[in-house]
Image (cartoon, coloured by chain):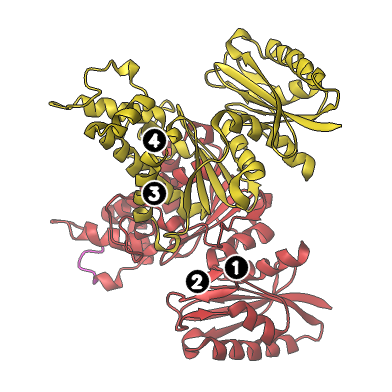
Chain colours: A red, B yellow
Amino acid sequence: MKELVLGIDIGGTNTDFGLVDSDGKIMARGHLDTRQYPAAGSFVAALTEAVAKLLQKDKSFQLRGVGAGVPNANPFTGIVEDPPNLPWEGRVALREMLAEQLKVPAEISNDANAAAMGELLYGAGGSQNFVVITLGTGIGAGIVADGVLLQGRDGLAGEIGHMIAIPDGRLCNCGRKGCFERYASATGLKETMHELLSRPGARSLLSGSDPRNLSSKRIFEAAESGDPLANEAFDYTARIIGKVLADVAAILSPEKFFFLGGLANAGERLLKPAKSYFENALLFIHQNKIAFEISSLKDREAAILGSAALLWHKLRN
Amino acid sequence: MKELVLGIDIGGTNTDFGLVDSDGKIMARGHLDTRQYPAAGSFVAALTEAVAKLLQKDKSFQLRGVGAGVPNANPFTGIVEDPPNLPWEGRVALREMLAEQLKVPAEISNDANAAAMGELLYGAGGSQNFVVITLGTGIGAGIVADGVLLQGRDGLAGEIGHMIAIPDGRLCNCGRKGCFERYASATGLKETMHELLSRPGARSLLSGSDPRNLSSKRIFEAAESGDPLANEAFDYTARIIGKVLADVAAILSPEKFFFLGGLANAGERLLKPAKSYFENALLFIHQNKIAFEISSLKDREAAILGSAALLWHKLRN
């Protein structure tokens, strides 16, 4: 028999899932359009049906458990509460629903924590003290300390995106001002670029672009082409990443920061200057001791592997 | 037999030690003048002699281990490296020296981590997720996450005192600018008071004081007497504590912050406004969920109990 865990990455638009073996190999994959299922019940029913089909592909497949990464998931209660960008309303007992329908143990967690578990089990190069940072629409972080996921009193640890990077800075969705994710996410980079383009006399390859069409990918390409303003936008983002992560390092003393998500695709263009600002901002006891790395898990796979890792980790311990 | 652990609090001026039972009761105490022993070898020899005398007081006393809280202690290597304010030079293998001389297992850690272990074993009211913050000459922090001391890759986690509170602010001993401990320690409060007194036309009960004679205790007394500038100094300190700890809470999601050390003696005068600024600065998911408390362990006892707790914790697990 081939023992497998279902890893599910539930996003506002797409839900990707896969059957993952204990070595982190995805044996079969599937997909749902999240928006087709306005209620969690119909979503779980459709998922269960799709998974049953996947399992029929190979008679040796044996489902041992299910792990789901989803925004606002509380790993202790198993409940997802008012998830942003998802159509589900109120409190959804997702862990219980998954376990009942799929008839195996289930775990849920937010996506950044799932990514950190994926890194711990299938990446990380043996590191036991690291932080996985997802630079996407927002910023999430999963913290592993001494080989254990740091969850805090309620599973809500790791909200690095809501550290204050710039006092009285940009207004955040959380209602406060100056949050890290307003600057260092893909959204933040776009806003920085928009501000730079709005300066009188600004000249850039991106001048005249409709702000709605600005993407971190286009800004990256402009920077690669030598556009000074696009480079300035990356430099500004890098400086803020360096500064905030120096504070995070003072608290956690990690070995590594792993980066994941849309903006992490900018690679060295972002991480090289960010690392340089980080070293400059760092307390001397940490200097030249903490690595910045792109996650070894591929973006789309990372979420599936990480979600499966939530359960594999439990099965092993 | 009464099983005891020796807890040692090694400071630049005073070394206090005590024999602690597994319930956290100090059965006997002793003291050394740290400055009399410029070499670690002579210090440990004097300590061993003093402890032998303590043990002779009661025939039922049985030494099971020793724990020491000391600045710059690495709990993994057992080495103390260039401890600030101590006369010892270079790398001192303190854990090994203690274990050899006292012939029992030894543990060492920095003082804030020792305080956190003391809080976990003998205080904390059952909390498994908290941060102990020592507001003394500097600021230290010991973090307990899910019932385990968070140490990071090298035992140097918890340097909350070196988070940047004010960009380009006051110069810190660490060589950087704006560190939290330059504002929210006893030293920081004195500097704030000194700045306020230096303002043109400043009127205060403390006007004309020699800056060297300003103490956090005198500033506290002036504030209690209704002195507006002394109150302003506390308010400014409280605002910075609230702001920085809101960032710490975003990362760790703790249940409680415990305060210890000289400035914590100001009690509600400091903690009440600090808590109010903290709540205002906090991400909404954490609001009204995280307590500020004065440590239940008495200042001088906390260090001894905490150091003993390093070893008691190990003996129990």
Please report the residue visible at 77 percent of the width from the left and 85 percent of the height from the top: A58
| Span shown in magenta | A204-210
**Real-space Cα separation, disc 2 to disc 1, in angstroms:** 11 Å
Three-letter amino acid code of the residue under disc 2: Pro
Residue wearing tag 1: A75
Three-letter amino acid code of the residue under disc 4: Ala
* Location of residue B54 in the rendering, given as x and y in whole percent from the top left corner: 76, 19
- Left or right of residue A87: residue A227: left
Residue wearing tag 3: B275
Q: Decide which of B180, A257 is in the foreground and name it.
A: B180
**Real-space Cα separation, disc 3 to disc 1, in angstroms:** 28 Å
Mark 1: few, some, or many residues within 10 Å (few <14, many ≥20)?
A: many
Do badges 4 and 2 share one subunit?
no
Q: Which tag is nearer the camera, tag 3 or tag 2?
A: 3
Secondary structure beneath dot 4 equals helix
Q: Which tag is nearer the camera, tag 2 or tag 1?
A: 1
Please report the residue visible at 59 percent of the width from the left and 79 percent of the height from the top: A94
Do badges 4 and 3 share one subunit?
yes
Do badges 3 and 1 share one subunit?
no
Mark 4: few, some, or many residues within 10 Å (few <14, many ≥20)?
A: many
Please report the residue visible at 69 percent of the width from the left and 90 percent of the height from the top: A53
